[in-house]
Image: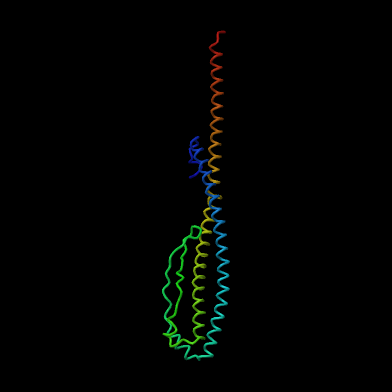
């Protein structure tokens, strides 16, 4: 609303001042929320970095175990066993609350291949490879969950920042301008009233002088 369209009344002045108080209180809460979101973002980011480092190590050990199994059992046996392994199960996705932001929570259900006896007495070297890549699967799920949470937190941080900026740089200055305008109009009306009273007083004095006996 343009300042010129504001009614310069005491009630409007009180309302505008109350809105400024509420806006500043909301701005303080938004800044606290943004700080908390940033702290949570960096905490999850550090955990994600740790998991990515762990994933690189697990992948290196996993491929090393596959090379060892291929050396011991041969590539044909390794391929035949791989064909017997079941597909990865479907991932159940729920949600969790991270600092007021809803993020996906992936099911941590362990991927368990069929028992070794059903895989023609799975050799130890191949079984070790399966177990290691099973661990990789779990870490990948955790990283995916962390990365998604980071993206959503970053989006919420930007949203909170924009809202705080709008209040601090647009709403509050506009309301303060309205207060200044109303007070300016009050001063104008007070000067006009004072000038009018002086004029009335002068006319009354002139009338009194004319009415006085010579």
Residue 94 point in image, percent of width and height: 43, 65
- Please state the total of marks drawn on the protein image: 0
| Residue in the foreground of this view, choosing between 79 and 131 | 131
Direction top: furthest residue: 214
Residue 198 sits above or below residue 189 on the image: above
Residue 142 sits above or below residue 120 on the image: above
Tell me which residue sits at (55%, 23%) in the image: 199
| Residue in the foreground of this view, choosing between 138 and 14 | 138
Residue 145 sits above or below residue 181 on the image: below
| Residue in the foreground of this view, choosing between 103 and 199 | 103
Residue 179 point in image, percent of width and height: 54, 40
Tell me which residue sits at (46%, 68%) in the image: 106
Residue 40 sits above or below residue 92 on the image: above
Instruction: Please name the colour scheme applied to the rendered image.
Output: rainbow
- Placement of the C terminus among the 4 image quadrants: top right
Tell me which residue sits at (56%, 66%) in the image: 45
Residue 113 point in image, percent of width and height: 44, 80
Asked which quadrant contains residue 196, the reply is top right
């Amino acid at each position: 609303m343009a300042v010129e369209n504001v009614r310069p009344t005491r009630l409007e002045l009180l309302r505008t001042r109350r809105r400024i108080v509420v806006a500043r209180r909301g701005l303080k809460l938004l800044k606290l929320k943004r700080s908390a979101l940033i702290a949570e973002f960096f905490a999850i980011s550090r955990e994600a970095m740790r998991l990515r480092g762990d994933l690189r190590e697990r992948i290196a050990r996993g491929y090393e175990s596959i090379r060892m199994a291929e050396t011991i059992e041969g590539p044909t046996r390794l391929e035949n066993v791989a064909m017997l392994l079941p597909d990865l199960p479907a991932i159940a996705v729920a949600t969790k609350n991270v600092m007021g932001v809803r993020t996906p929570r992936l099911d941590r259900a362990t991927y368990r291949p069929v028992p070794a006896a059903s895989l023609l007495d799975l050799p130890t070297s191949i079984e070790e490879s399966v177990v290691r890549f099973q661990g990789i699967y779990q870490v990948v799920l955790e990283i995916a969950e962390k990365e998604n949470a980071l993206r959503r937190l970053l989006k919420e941080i930007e949203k909170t920042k924009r809202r705080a900026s709008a209040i601090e740089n647009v709403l509050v200055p506009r309301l303060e301008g309205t207060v200044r305008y109303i007070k300016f109009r009050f001063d104008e009306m007070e000067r006009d009233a004072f000038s009018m009273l002086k004029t009335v007083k002068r006319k009354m004095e002139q009338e009194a002088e004319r009415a006085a006996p010579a």
